[in-house]
Every structure is written in structure tokens, then in C-alpha cells.
Image: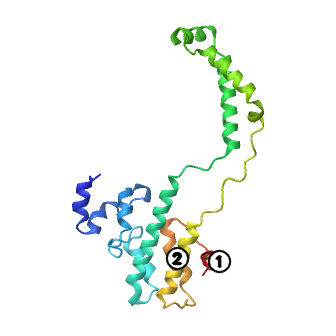
Amino acid sequence: MRNDEERTSVGAGRDDDWFAPFDGLPVEAIPAYAIDHLLRPDSFFERFPWPYDILQMKDIVSSIPLHNRANVAQDVVYRARLFISAQRARRMLPKKASPQNEIEQLRDATRRLNTAISGLSLKARQYLIEKCGPGGFDVGDLGAALHRFQIDNRAALESPPESKDMRGRPESSAANVRSYFAGIFVAAHDGVKPARGQPKFVELCCAPLGLAILTPEGIEKSTSRNARRKGT
């Protein structure tokens, strides 16, 4: 991987030269600094339209009036990169807490540990005590402390709080990016939605991002829902 000095010197040249080694790599393999750079306003969109390839971008803009194709390519690529950046950041967040599952795991772990201690042979027990050293916290102390913990916390361990559905609301970022793509298509036609073309355009924009393809009705509902949420 290139160091900061190499990145600066190469980055001062052509972006498509700099990022050519990343072309075709899965999203997870793209370094974070590259994602940040790809979101800069001066990043090339037409000659290096990652996460799309040139042929995919040609298909995407094929239904767009010629005079708006360059702007559409830039808008689509930027929104796609922004979506990928957000997804990467989201995966780094800690998982939501689930007290019920966590306490059940603790309860089961203490039971397994108690069983392991109880099952130690005399030789194993003596060996552990000898290696612990005088005055140390030996296996007997551990067994006694574990037994005390299980007794004092029996009510909580046996009846953990019932967890609510910890999945939360479905992620809205996928719906948002679909809505943006649909809006880009309409804006490219001077704000008038054509009778045909939008569903295919959105599908072509979403497929390389690994997003499920919606029906035309689904796209319409997603777009309307996001518009209401934004107060438009």
C-alpha cells in the first residue's frame, strides 16, 4: 500500500491513474482513504465511474438526453459512492444491545464453567493449586466465587429481561439512494417524468451496489415515502 507521500504525489496527477489498481476490486477491498478521495468534487466520474465500469455507465446514461449525460453520470456516481461510504461506516458501529441474549449467554457460560470445575480430577486440581502459588486465587476460590455469583444473581440469570425486537427499523439508506436515482432521472428530463425508462434506469444504478431491484410500483412507493419524510 502506498504511503501518504506517494498518495499525495500520485494524487496530484490523474485520478484514474491513481485508482486504476482498485478498479474491479470488491468494495471491502477499497482502502478508506481512497473512498474519501473518491468523494471529492474534483474526482473523475466519467473516465473512472467506480463503483460502475465504463460499460455500465454507458447503459445508465443511454436513456438520458445527450446534453445532460455528463451531469447524470457525475450525480449517479457521487450518490453511489456516498451510499458505499455510509454502508462502510455503519458496519463499523457496535451492534445494538440485547440484554436478554447477553444475560442468557452469561448464564450458560457460568454453568459450563461450573461443570468444568466440578469435573476436574484430583490430579488436575492439585496441579492448578501448585502452579497458582501460595496466597493466589486458585481453582477452589474460583469455584466458590462462581457458586456465590450464581446464588446471588439467580433471579436475573434465570429470568432475563425479555428483549424487544432489536432489529430496529429497516435501513433507510437503500431507499434513499433509490429515491435519489429516481430523482436524477426526472431532473435529467427537465423535471418531467417520462412515461418509460425510470425503473430500468434505477435498476441499472442499483444493481452494481448489490441492492435488491424493486418493481416500478416499489420504486414509486419508495420515492413517495422519502419525499414525505423530507417534507416535499
Expressed as whole percent of the image width and height from the top left, the position of residue 111 reads 69, 27
Does residue 83 sit above or below 220 in this rendering? above
Say which residue appears at 42% left-offset and 67% top-offset: 51
Expressed as whole percent of the image width and height from the top left, the position of residue 105 reads 67, 36
Expressed as whole percent of the image width and height from the top left, the position of residue 83 reads 48, 66
Does residue 65 sit above or below 231 in this rendering? below
Amino acid residing under circle 1: Lys
Q: The C terminus is located in which quarter?
A: bottom right
Q: Which residue is mark 1?
A: 221
Tag 1, which secondary structure?
helix
Say which residue appears at 51% left-offset and 77% top-offset: 181
The Cα atoms of the two marked residues, 2 and 1, are separated by 13 Å
**Left or right placement of residue 172 versus residue 99 in this view:** left
Tag 2, which secondary structure?
helix
Say which residue appears at 27% left-offset and 54% top-offset: 4
Q: Which is nearer the N-term, disc 2 or disc 1?
A: 2
Q: Which mark is on residue 171?
A: none
Q: Residues within 10 Å of mark 2 (few under 14, many from 20)?
A: some
Q: Which mark is on residue 180?
A: 2
